[in-house]
Amino acid sequence: MNALETLLETTLRTLPPVLLAGMGGMLANRIGILNLGLEGMMLTGSFVGVIASYYTGSAYGALLIAGLASALVALIFSLFTIRFKANPTVVGVAVNMLIAGLSTYFLSVLFGVRGSFSDSNIVGLPKIALPGISEIPVLRAFNNQNLTVWLALLFVILLHYVFYHTSLGLRIRATGQFPMAVTTAGVNVKALQYGALVFGGFLCGLGGAHLSLGQLTLFTEDMTSGRGFIALAAAIFGKNTPVGTLIGALLFSFTDGVTRRIQTSGFPSMLIDMIPYIVTVVTLWIVEMHALSRRKKMLTGRASRK
Amino acid sequence: MEYSVELEGIRKVYGPVIANDDISIKVRKGSVTCIVGENGAGKSTLMNILYGLEQPTAGTIRINGETVRFSSSRDAIKKKIGMVHQHFMLVNELSVLENVIIGMEPRKGPSLNYKKARAVVSELGERFGMQVPLDEKAGDLAVGIQQKVEILKILYRGAEILIFDEPTAVLTPQETRELFANIRTLTADGKTVLLITHHLDEVMEISDDIVVVRRGKVVATLKKEETDVKQLAFHMVGSALPEECQREEKQSDQVVLAVKEITVAGANKPNAVNRLSLEVHEGEILGVAGVSGNGQSELARALAGLVPVTSGSISLCDRDITRKSRRARLLDGISYIPEDRKTDGLCLQWSIAENAIAGYYVQPAYSGRFGFINRKKMNETAERIIQEYDVRTPSAAVPVGSLSGGNQQKVVIGRETVVDPKLIIAAEPTRGVDIGAVSFIHNDIIALRNKGVSVLLISSDLDEIFRLSDRIAVMYNGEIAAIVDPSSITREELGLYMAGAKKEG
C-alpha cells in the first residue's frame, strides 16, 4: 500500500466513533435538543462493550449490549430533558461526568484495576475481509476494515433515506424547526424526541464499542477523549444532514490519521495531539462565517428584489 | 335544524379565574358563526376547548349530535375539526406541500408518496379556489398565502368544522376580502365555520350568526340581520362607549419632527428602514399605516432613540438630534409608547407608581440632590395618572402586571403624556386593549393633538389610522409608499399601497 492508501485506511479505521456519535448528535439537533452527553454515551459503549465481551465471549453480543447500554443512558438523558424539562446542556455535562466516574468505579470494583483494563478473554470485533478488492488500488483500503466501519456507513444511507423519503423523516425535520406546528398537526412530538435521542444513544454505543473492541481490545479511562464533542462538531459542520455529517466525520478522522502519522516522526506528541481539536474549532468557525455571509447576502438580495 | 357543534354549559376554571362560565352555543351546519368579545373575554379558551387543546371543567360538547370528549387536538381532528391559529403553525424551512401533509402523509411501502400527496393537495386547492405554490418554502410566502396553506392543511385533514382565530389581524384589506370569499366557498360546500374576531365591521360582513362573549359568559346570541355594529359594541363592553372627542381645526404648519433619508438596520435586515423621510407638524397626527414587519418597529425605535440610524438625520424643532440618546430625547420632549407594553413599556413586577416615572426619574422633579427618588412626587404623579386616565386599580402600590391589558396600557400612555411632550411616538397604542379602553385612548390622543402636541401614530389597525390621522403615510418594505389625506382615499386604495402593489410618484 502506498502512503495515500495507508492514510485512507487509517481514516476509515478511526471513522466509526465520530461518525456514529455524529449521527446521534445530528438526530438530537434535528428534534431540537442539544445533546452534549454524546461523550458519556460513547464512553458507556466502550466500557460496557469490553465487559460484555469479557463475560460473554461474543463480539456481536458485546456490540449489541454496548449499543443498548448507551441507549439506556440516552433514555435517562431524554427523561430529564423532555419529561422534567431540565436544561439539556446541564444534563449533557452531568451525563459525561457521571459515566466517567462510574466507569472508573466499576473498573476497580469488577476487576480491581485502575486506569485501564485488558484481558485475553476479551474478543475484538470481527474484520470484514473482501478478497476481491485486495489487489485494486485505493479501494483496497476498504479491505479488512472493522464491522463497525460498514455499519456506520450503512446507517448514513439508512438515515438519509429516512430523512428525505419517509414521513418519519419529514416529522423529524419539522420538529427541530417548529415543534408546535408538528404537535398541532396531530403528531406526538415527545415520542418522536424520545425515539430520536434513544436511537442516537444506541449509535453512540456502537461508536464507543469500536473504540474499545475495534483496534485494540482494551478499555482505558476517558478513552473517548473528546470525540463526542468532535462528533457534535461534525454534525454541525454537516448542517445536520446524514451525508454532511459523514463528510464532517471523514474530515476529522482524516486529521486524526495524519496526526498519527506525524506522531511517529518525532514531534512532541502533546502538540500533535492538539491538531484534531484545533481543526474542529477552525472548521466550525469557517462554517459559521460562511453561513453568516450567506444569510446576509440572501437578505439584501431579497430586499433588492422587491 | 341540524347543528354541527353544540356546546352546553361549558365551564373552565383556572385557579381563582373563571375563563368560561356556563357557555352554551349552537352552530348551524354550513353557517359562519362569529364569536366576538374583548381580549380576555374567554373566546380563545372556548375555541381551545373545542379543538381539544384544553379540557373543560364542566359541560358537554356535541359534534353532529354525538357527545364527545377530547383529550388532545388529535381527538378533535378525528372528529373533523380543524383550527387556523392566529400565529401560523407552519415550518418555514419546509415546502408548502410538506407543511400541508405533515402528520397525515400518504405512503407507498415504507416511503412517503410525494406524487400522491401532490395530486391530492393540488386537487384540494382547485376545489376550494386556493392555489398555492407547492414547492416554495413556506417561510418565503406572503402572509395571505401562508394563511391559505394553513386552511389547506386542515382541509387536507378532512375538516368539516373550521375554527379561525383572529384570521384578519395580519391581512391587508384585499387579503381579508379574499379570505372571506374562500370562507364562503367552504360554507357553500357544507362546511361549518367558527370565527373569532373583535373587528365588528368584519363580523357584519361575514357572519350568519353572532355570539357575543363578555367576562366568560355569553351575553348575546344574534342573527346578523337583527343587529348592527353599535349594538354589538354595546354588548361587548356592557355599556355605551364614551362620546367621540372632536378634533379642532389644525392651526400650525410648524415642523416639529423632520426625518431626512434615514436608514435603520433591523434584526436580520440591514435596511429595515430604507432612506425614509417624513415630517410631523405641530398639533398633527401623522398615521403610519402598513402591514406589520415593513419597518415600522425599527422606525419607531430609531426615532425614540433606542437604535442608531446608519445614515440620514433626525431633527426636533430644527435642532439635530440624530446622535442623541433615548434619555436626551426624553428630556427634549419625545415621548414613546412602545408597541409591546409587556416587554418594552412596563416592568410588570413593579408597582403602578414605580412604572409611572420609569424612565422619567432622571427629571430633577423626581431625583433628589443625592440621587434618591422623591417618592412623594412619584406617588403624586401616579395618582394623577390613575385619576386622569381612569386606571381601574385598588391603589398605586399594586404591581402593574396584575392589571388588565387596557389598564396597563393606560399607565403607559399616562406616563408618556403627563410630562407635556412635544412629540409622541405611539406604536400600536391600542393593541390588545378592550374597546372601552380603545375609545378612551383615542380620545386622549385627539385631545393631545388639539393641545398642539405632535403625534406619530404607528398602527397596523386601519380603523385606528382612519379615525385618528390628519395625514397617512403608508409604509412598505422600509419606505414610504405614499402620503395621503384620509378623507380622500378608500381603504382598498390604501390596501394597495400597503401590499406594495402601488407606489406614489
Image (cartoon, coloured by chain):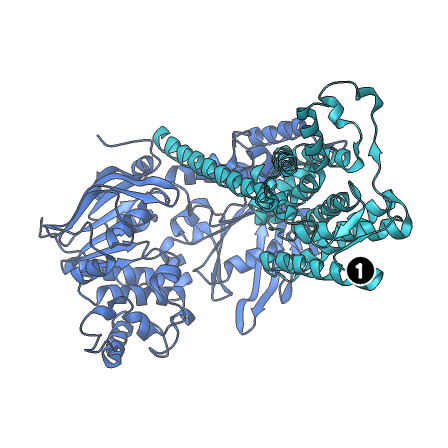
Chain colours: A cyan, B blue
Task: Answer few, some or many: residues within 10 Å of disc 1's Cα (few below 14, many 20 plus, some between 14 and 19).
Answer: some
Q: How many marks?
A: 1
Q: Position of residue A166 (x, y in %)?
A: 69, 35
Residues A84 and A231: in front is A231
Q: Does the image show residue B161? A: no
Q: Is residue B406 above or below residue B279?
A: below
SS for dot 1: loop
Tell me which amino acid carries mark 1. Answer: Val
Tell me the quarter of the picture where residue B405 sits.
bottom left
Tell me the quarter of the picture where residue A289 sits.
top left
Q: Is residue B96 left or right of residue B454?
A: right
Q: Is residue A85 left or right of residue B18?
A: right
Picture residue at 46% right of the left edge, 63% below the top: B40
Q: Does the image show residue A126? A: yes
Image quadrant containing the C terminus of chain B: top left
Residue at numbered disc 1: A113
Q: Position of residue A133 (x, y in %)?
A: 79, 21
Please give the chain letter of the residue carrying mark 1: A
Q: Residue furthest top?
A: A136
Q: Is residue B337 above or below residue A143?
A: below
Q: Position of residue A276 (x, y in %)?
A: 59, 41
Picture residue at 66% right of the left edge, 55% below the top: B72
